[in-house]
Image (tube, helix red, strand yellow):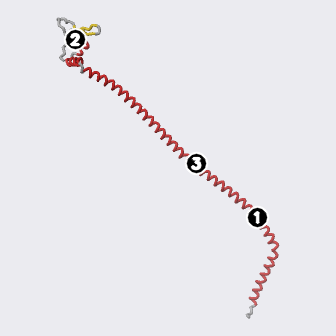
Amino acid sequence: MAHLSDSVAQQIMGEIDDLVKRIEATSNQIPQMEALQATVKIVLKEFNTTAGIMVMGETARMKAELAKGAIDVAQTVADDIAGKSKLEWIAASVAVAFCAFSFSGWMMYKKGYQSGYAEGHEHGYVETKDERSAASWANTPEGKLAYGLAQAGSIRRLAECDSDGWTVKGSACFPNVGSNNMIYGWKIKP
């Protein structure tokens, strides 16, 4: 076996002595350790309670902020939907008004057209009836004689009774003898 030198042994003994002193110091502190542990437990319990209260308060605050954020988002969405609904109602109202005015205008045009057409047709029928009567009279012997007078240029003078040798008596025009003893009149060749 190897022998330890005195200096190494002395060093080991010094370390053992320090260790013993530490053990004794620690053993003297054991009653204080139990009190310290009890205090630590009380502090930890209070810390847990305080921390729980703080966590609950922070949770409540965060929930309130989330609720406020949700309300803001819901309000924004509601405003957007309301704005779109307003635009849809406005567009629908404009479309209905346009259709109503268009229909009303079309109805007025149609009624006016029908009324004008009916009046024109009636007026044209009356005119045509008169022309038919005139055309059929013109083909009679009297009509042919009147046509001959018109071509001779005398029909107006006969109608107004303003030719020489003619006088108006009442509402009729009669030939008479003129100042030179001539009788004026017309002869129409058929």
Q: Residue at x 52, y 42 (%)?
A: 89
Please give the residue where the numbered disc 2 appears in the rendered image: 163
- The amino acid at mark 2 is Ser
Depth check, mark 3 against mark 2: the one in front is 2
User: Is the residue 143 above or below the residue 29 in the image?
Assistant: above
Q: Which mark is residue 78?
A: 3
Query: Furthest-bottom residue in view?
Result: 1
Secondary element type, mark 3: helix
Contact between labelled residues 2 and 3, with CB atoms less than 8 Å apart: no
Disc 3 + disc 1, Cβ < 8 Å: no
The C terminus: image quadrant: top left
Quarter where residue 12 is shown: bottom right
Q: Nearer the viewer, residue 174 or 41?
A: 174
Q: Position of residue 131 (x, y in %)?
A: 29, 23
Say left or right for 171 vs 187: right
Name the residue: 47% across, 37% down: 100
- The kind of secondary structure element at disc 1 is helix
Q: Is residue 3 left or right of residue 83?
A: right
Distance from disc 2 to disc 1, alpha carbons, whole Å, reads 148 Å
Q: Is residue 63 above or below residue 132?
A: below
92 displayed left or right of 6: left
Residue topped by disc 1:
45
Quadrant that contains the N terminus? bottom right
Q: Residue 79 has which mark? A: none
Residue 180 percent across, percent down from the top left:
17, 5
Residue kind at label 1, given as amino acid type: Lys
- Disc 2 or 1, which lies upstream in sequence? 1
| Separation (CA) of disc 3 from disc 2 | 100 Å
Circle 2 sits in a helix, a strand or a loop, which is it?
loop
Q: Nearer the viewer, residue 139 or 42?
A: 139
Q: Residues within 10 Å of mark 3 (few under 14, many from 20)?
A: few
